[in-house]
Amino acid sequence: MAMIENSDRGITLNKSFAWTMACGLVGAGLWVGLQVATLRGETAALSQTINGLRVDLTASEARQAALTSRVRANETALARQDERLSLILSTLNKIDNRLERMERLPIR
């Protein structure tokens, strides 16, 4: 006997074949349902991870901005200090030149 027959009542299926098809369809439905549920759970976990990373990135950007402003302030202070040291050095050079000239003059 064939599994599928065409009769005057329409297409008929063998009982064991029909049960196999029904179980297969139910099994496939369960498998698809489990896969969808797993993917939803993973999607939720990934969304939480992404939100956590966004918060960390925002905090990191804030720290970087604070560090950048501190570095700029230090650079400005160092530039001022360099200028002062340069002025002190030029003053010391002038004093040194004057001392050399005074040493060259004859003593009276």
Image (cartoon, rainbow, N blue to C red):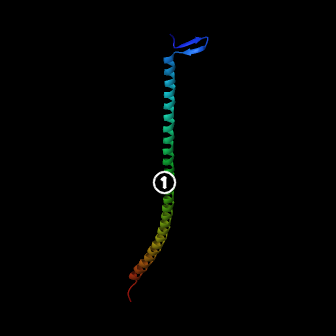
Q: In this view, does 101 lie above or below 4?
A: below
Q: In which quarter of the image is residue 103?
A: bottom left
The answer to whether residue 105 is left or right of residue 28 is left
Residue 22 or 90: which is nearer the viewer?
Answer: 22
Residue 38 or 26: which is nearer the viewer?
Answer: 26
Q: Which residue lies furthest to the bottom in this view?
A: 108
The answer to whether residue 94 is left or right of residue 11 is left
Across and down, in percent, residue 97 comes to: 43, 77
Residue 66 or 89: which is nearer the viewer?
Answer: 66
Across and down, in percent, residue 77 comes to: 48, 69
The residue drawn where x is 51% and y is 63% is 69
Across and down, in percent, residue 19 comes to: 50, 21
Given the image, on which type of amino acid does mark 1 rest? Asp
Q: What element carries label 1?
A: helix
Residue 34 or 46: which is nearer the viewer?
Answer: 34
The residue drawn where x is 51% and y is 22% is 21
Quadrant where the C terminus lies? bottom left
Across and down, in percent, residue 105 comes to: 40, 83
Q: In this view, does 30 lie above or below 76?
A: above
* Residue beneath disc 1: 56
The residue drawn where x is 49% and y is 70% is 80
How many numbered dots are placed on residues in this image?
1
Q: 10 Å neighbourhood of mark 1: few (<14), some, or many (≥20)?
A: few
